[in-house]
Amino acid sequence: MSAIEPTRPTPLSPKASKTRQWRRRQIITTYAAYATTVVLTSVRAHATLGSGVRGPLGIAFGLAGITFIVSLVWLIGPSVRYGLSSRSYRQPAPGEFKQLKDQGVSASQAQAMFSRPADERQRAIRQRAQAVSYRIVGPVIVVVALYLIFAPTFFERVWLPSTQGEQVGLFAGFALLFSTLPAAVIAWSEPDPVPET
Amino acid sequence: MASPRGAPKPAAGVYNRLAVLRADRGDSRQQLADALGINYQTVGFLERGDYAPSLELAIRISELFHLPVEAVFSLRPFRPLSEELYGQSPQEATRR
């Protein structure tokens, strides 16, 4: 036992810990906001719209964009922590950092207390999530590539990412899938946390 | 988890007495997790039978409780401790 030990963790309340329902809602919001932003980008670029439609569409685009950015920022931290990292992190209870600071613990020492190597169950679920993500991302890339290559040959009127906004949107979609899918799979499938006591 | 006979099989397929043994020690899940070097959520998963530990972790858990592995983990439901220790079923114990 080192001289500096974390204070006894406060038992998790359902409010402090994220329930599975909450996590699922967050994932759906992020991906739905992304899809809405991309669709509206394309509609704004190609459709001939009257001035009465342009205003509400602009507002909807702005709201979808903001929702996407906010939920993506929220998702990046957990994605790195739980999808890509091999460490286990414990969320400090409210006031726990301050308590440690009062005990003379430096910020980096306090951070280290809440981080340890992931245990065997955590490593196993991360590996499974990465395998599931691979099985999802692989076919998605193949389908999108086949569509981009062959759709113009077989159909007269097809959607292709012709503007810069649409191309960035498509690229952002792949970046989103690659970076957040393992964590999203874990967040989707993990049951509600158990109390610490 | 001392599963009575006839209890549904745990999702992980392995029965264990972890919850009973932890309660016996008066430890929280976090304290047991700290002693084993694992996450407290993993202790919860083990107790619920949702996760079957590796051989290494099973041995470490057994050593922590100073018990043989087969006293903590089993592929068959455990007999209730009252029956095992005193040869009576919980119903008989209640009648006395």
Image (cartoon, coloured by chain):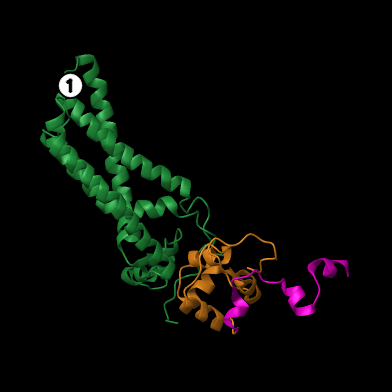
Residue name at image x 44 percent, y 63 percent: A96
Farthest-out residue, front: A154
Q: Is residue A15 above or below residue B73?
A: above
Q: Nearer the viewer, residue B50 or A61?
A: B50
Which residue is at 46% across, 74% downward? Answer: B54
Image quarter where the N terminus of chain B lies is bottom right
Which one is in front, A40 or B34? A40
| Rendered view: B26 above or below A64 | below
Please give the name of the residue rendered at 72% of the width and 71% of the height, measured from the top-left corner.
B80
Q: Amino acid at mark 1?
A: Ala
For label 1, the SS is loop
Q: Nearer the viewer, residue A31 or B72?
A: B72
Indicate the position of residue B3 as horizontal and vertical percent values: 66, 66
Quarter of image, res A44: top left
- Image coordinates of residue A81 in percent, x first then y, are 33, 60
Tell me what hue chain A is rendered in: green
Where in the figure is residue B53, as x and y percent of width and height?
A: 49, 71
B6 shown above or below A173:
below
* Residue under pointer 1: A47
Tell me if residue A105 can be seen: yes
Q: Position of residue B87 (x, y in %)?
A: 80, 77
Q: Which residues are magenta?
A: B67-96
Which colour denotes chain B? orange
Q: Is residue A148 above or below residue B24?
A: above
